[in-house]
Image (cartoon, grey):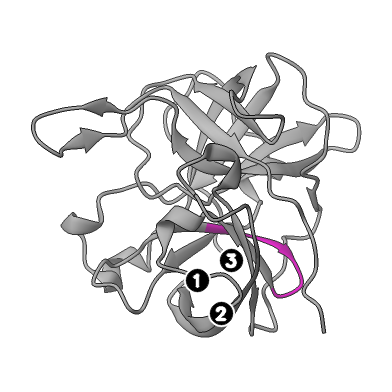
Amino acid sequence: MTKSTQPASHFEIPEEVRAVRVCLVADPLSEKPWSGSGVPVGDQILATTMHEFSFLPLTARPLRLDGRQFQAEVYSTGGTDWRIDANDWLLARIDSDDLRPASGTQIDFERELRQGARVYLIGFPGDPTRIDRTLAEQMKPQVFSGSLVAQGSDGPRTFRVKLDDDASLGGISGGAAVVLDEVKREAVVVGICRGAAVQSVGIGLISWTFGREQVVVRPVLSTPQK
């Protein structure tokens, strides 16, 4: 596990937040060096977004995490249409003995959050067309700070975070959305990053995911059946 780096921000990133484990996720069946990010939410359990992959529900297939290849079995998803924000998540069992949340990190997708709460987004942003797989797998996760500005438009399992600074967060999909428990001084993963709240469309089919408002989706946590 590597510590997250800190981009320029108006707020200092707490050490507890920087210690949250986030994985660089790559699809071995794709030519892209990485597909996005993923969050360990239990022993051998990874949460990420559906739109990153050509996953079929409840199927097993290879997956690369932080440069190592494992077998992944998707056992729960948000639904069949990942274009709906609240549906865009999956849980997969990974055959890795050391895949688990960092010590001192809570996973709580049901935690009540207040308007204006400080939220940190952690993942691997970047343009996969400009870097090869070897260099990509040496990257460290980055932390972006913002505040909760609104619940999602499609139900209580999504909310929006307004970043303190403009950023292009391609590649951060599936990364961790984190708040700090000020009493226990523990980082709490409250959701996973889904993507920009508004995508401006350019010429033809070109679109950009630049923007300060990002959507966070909250998976329904469960464990795989034996």
Q: Secondary structure at mark 3?
A: loop
x and y percent of residue 60 in the render?
Answer: 55, 83
Residue at x 53% of width, y 38% of height: 85
Closer to viewer: mark 3 or mark 1: 1
- Give the amino acid type for the residue marked by disc 3 in the picture: Met
State left or right for residue 20 relative to residue 137: right
Closer to viewer: mark 2 or mark 3: 2
x and y percent of residue 192 in the render?
Answer: 60, 45
Location of residue 166 (image quadrant): top left
- Compared with 37, 143 (above or below) is above
- Give the amino acid type for the residue marked by disc 2 in the picture: Thr
- Compared with 159, 108 (above or below) is below
What residue does disc 3 label? 1
Q: How far apart are labels 1 and 2 at the CA level?
A: 6 Å
| Marks 3 and 1 in Cβ contact (< 8 Å) | no
- Give the amino acid type for the residue marked by disc 1 in the picture: Leu
Q: Secondary structure at mark 2?
A: loop
| Marks 1 and 2 in Cβ contact (< 8 Å) | yes
- Residue in front for this viewpoint, 223 or 94: 223
Give the quarter of the figure containing the N terminus.
Answer: bottom right
x and y percent of residue 149 in the render?
Answer: 60, 15
Q: Is residue 196 visible?
A: yes
**Labels 3 and 1: the sequence-earlier one:** 3
- Compared with 168, 11 (above or below) is above
- Residue in front for this viewpoint, 50 or 4: 50
x and y percent of residue 116 in the render?
Answer: 68, 14
What residue does disc 2 label? 59
Single out the residue that lies furthest toward the right. 183
Highlighted range, magenta: 38-44
What residue does disc 1 label? 56
